[in-house]
Each structure stands twice: as structure tokens, then as C-alpha cells.
Amino acid sequence: MGRENFGSKLGAVLAAAGSAVGLGNVWRFPIETGQNGGAAFIIIYVLCIIILGLPIMISEFLIGRYTHANTAGAFRIVSNGSPWKWVGRMGVFTGWFILCYYVVVGAWTLHYTYLSVTNAFYGVPAQQYENIFGDFVSSSWMPTLWLFLFIGVIHFVITRGVQSGIEKSAKLMMPTLFVITIFLAVCSIMLPGASKGVEFLLKPDWSKVDSTTILEAMGQAFYSLSLAMGCLCTYASYFEKNTPLAKSAVNVALIDTLIAIMAGFIIFPSIFNIGMDPNEAGVGASLTFVSLPNVFQQALGDGSVLAVVFSAMFYFLLFVAALTSAISLHEVATAYVTEEFNMSRKKGATLVTATILVLGTLCSLSFGPLSGVTLFDRNIFEIFDDFSGRILLPLGGMLISIFAGWVLDRRLYHNEISNQGNLKTPYFRMLVFSLRYIAPLAIGLVFLDQLGAFSFLK
């Protein structure tokens, strides 16, 4: 049986965009923007996408499409079996590793969608939202129940194959995600006092820009595009030979950035509507699952139909964003197992799902029954998060850029991005220059920053 490809260019772009668009777009980007100069941060971020993100994304696309193999097999082929093949294996491990804790947060979004739909936040005092979240994540069974449901949806999509599962779901979920984001942003902008939130988000404040801002922008650009996780390389292995790689990469980056900016338009006008200081709203889980439920109730009317609908749609948006990324991460591991060990897709996917169920459950329970299991004062979830974000991702990105810029055959690279000379590539030399010099240096700085080398600057 032949290897599947995506059935259309649109499906390929939507699937790749779904891989990139994830919780980081709503979870991290708006706060990074708000704390680092608003529009000034967005400008720096876009420059980082162009200079750092696109070259590596195009390289991953190129290697995947050229080999039509899973990420580990792809790097083995283009490296001729040299030690550089371990870059591909590292990408598979990274994606697999990230998925183990990513599904936990995906399960949280499902639970909060349910709470919103059932109007469970009606009449809840502001100080109680933290207790609601804390009681939920520390429960021994409720988070696990939602976790199994979330993983079950992923497994269902993956076992249906590339076209019937991944591509079909992307064609359904990405437009849905886009429409919901626009709707929520428009509703939020129409709130009283929303103009202050819009101004806070988009008015450049260059006084807040320093060396750490640039590092934060580079890190956000790197993580937001799903670089070095094996996702882009794996999905590109399902591209048709005539798929324009550079154009596809630009389209993915545009969709990803647009969703992230619109998430800011959802959050900040709502925060300013109730007079809350954005810097006190929290970050990550504190913002998403503690502050925002309270913000939506106060801004839209406690228990009102609008509050219920807005809150439910917001957490459903988070669920869809988490799901599209989780599917791509699962496919990285599934493609590796099925091709490297000659398994059927169903068996390979089941094996991957089983490992995610076990390790994901351990990560989920690390906030409750297993909270005492720590290493360097970090619970199991935090260990998975820190190791992947601080070490695996920046290290993998640096190795990919060095390999693509210095090791990969230059003629092969040019032939692939030009589709055998059928497309003009006036950016080729700049692309190679970035891969050789700019990207490794930039990622190296991010890597050192993640390890705390520049903490004295903050």
C-alpha cells in the first residue's frame, strides 16, 4: 500500500497551520505583547518570523517533502546515514515528549468548555476562581477523565489516516477556529472601554523594548511555529511534489500570527473593560483558567446568555487550537513507529496513544496525588515542560539550521524550493545566509536565555 499524501494544497496548508496554531497563540502571545511594548513587540516578532522562523520552517518542509518519510527517516536519508540523522530522531522524541504534557492542558480546555456551557461560573466571587481551578487540577479523577476524552479524539483522527483524518479535520477545525476568533475579537472590541485595551495592545511603547524583549520575541517566534518538533517535517512528507514550499511557509506564518494577534483583541479589551491591570491578570494557566473566567463574567454580565456563549466559545477555541497541534504531534510519533518498525497505522497509533495515556496521566496527577514527586522542586508536568522548552526545542532548532545551512547539499536545497527550477527564488542567498549565521546565533541566545544565562538583564 502506497504512502498517503494530502489531497489538496489547501489541506496541506491548513494542516500545517493547525500544527503551528496552538495554545501558545492564546496562552502566551498576548501577554508577551502586552508586557513588551505592544505593537513594538509585534514588529520585532514579525521580523523574527522572517529572519529566524521562515528559514527553518522552509528547511523542515524541504527535507520532509524531498524524502517523503517520517522525520527520523527523512534526516537519515538527507544526511546519508551520518551522525546528523540523530537530529531527526531528536525531533521525533521532542514531539512525543511535548505531547505527554500538552494533552493535560488540552483536557483542561475541555473541562472549562463544559463549565462555561453549564453556566457554572454564575455568581462565583472573584476570589473563588483560583480555588475552582486548584480543586480541579488536584482531583484524582476529574482531570484524568477529560484527559482520556481528549486523547481519544486525537486517536480517532490519527487512525483515519492522512486525508480522511488529518486533512479532513484540519479543513473543518481551522475555518471554525478562525471564525470563532474573529467573532470573539469583534465582541470584545465592542465592549465599553475596549479602546484602552486595543491601544494597550497596538500602540508601540519603545521604552519597554530592551535586549530581553528581543529574546522573548525570538523565543515566541520559534515556539509558535512548531519548529524542531518534527511536525512540519512530517506533514511536509505528505505534500505533493509541486507544493510551493516558501509560499506555504509564508501562509502558515501569516495564519499563525493573525490568530495570535486576534487573541490579544479578545483578551485585553475584556480586561480593560472591568478596570483590571493586565500585568496583574497573570500568565499561562493563571490568566487562562483563573483570571479570564472572572473577566468574562464581569464584562458581559454575570450569568448572562452573552457571558455563557462568549466564555464557552473562548474555551472551545482553546480546545480546537490545542487539538490541531496535538494531532500533529501525535502524527510525528505515529509516522515514525509505523515506518521504522513496519507497523500498520492502527497498531502504530495505538502504541503511541498508550504511551501518551500513561505519561499524560502521570503529568496530570502531578498537580494532585503525585504532587510530592519532584525533581529540583519541579513536579512531573513541569519537568516535561521545562526539559522540552528550555533544552530540546532550542537545541533541535539550532541543529536543524546548521544542518540545512552547512551540511545539506546546496543544489538539492535550491532544486527543492524552486520546484526543479519552475519557481523563482530571489531570496535563496539570504535564506542560506540566515540558516548559516543568523538563525544559529539567534537560537543560541534563546537557548542561553532559557537556561538563565541572561537573568541579570531582567
Image (cartoon, helix red, strand yellow):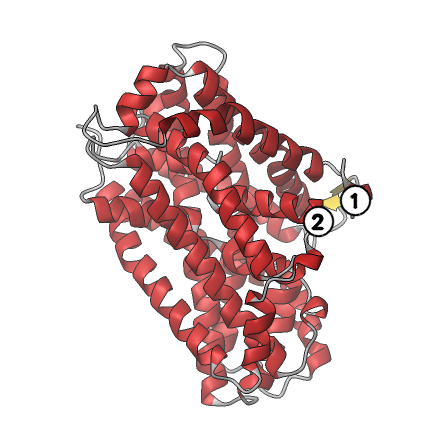
Which class describes the residues within 10 Å of circle 2: few (<14), some (14-19), or many (20+)?
few
Identify the image quadrant of residue 410: top left
Q: Nearer the viewer, mark 1 or mark 2?
A: 2
- Residue kind at label 2, given as amino acid type: Asp
What residue appears at the point 40 percent right and 16 percent down from the top-left corner?
A: 408
- N-term mark: 1 or 2: 2
Along the viewing direction, whichever of 50 and 178 lies nearer the viewer? 50
What kind of residue is marked 1? Leu
In x, y percent, where is residue 38? 60, 62
Q: Is residue 220 above or below residue 122?
A: above
Residue 132 shows which numbered tag?
none
Query: In the rendering, at what x and y percent does residue 424 appear?
Result: 25, 32
Mark identifier at residue 210: 2
Callout 1–callout 2 Cβ contact below 8 Å: yes
The residue that disc 1 covers is: 457
Element under disc 1:
helix
Q: Residue at x 21, y 34 (%)?
A: 240
Does any portion of residue 219 appear in the rendered image?
A: yes
The residue positioned 38% from the left and 33% from the top of the image is: 58
Residue closest to the far right: 456
* Quadrant position of residue 161: top left
Q: Is residue 264 left or right of residue 238?
A: right
Q: Quadrant of residue 179?
A: bottom left
**Looking at the figure, which quarter contains the N terminus?**
top left
> Pointer 1: residues within 10 angstroms few (<14), some, or many (20+)?
few
Q: Residue at x 63, y 33 (%)?
A: 391
**Is 38 drawn above or below residue 160 in the view shown?**
below
x and y percent of residue 390 in the render? Answer: 65, 38
Q: Position of residue 382 (x, y in %)?
A: 67, 46
Query: Is 153 positioned to the left or the right of 133 in the image?
Result: left
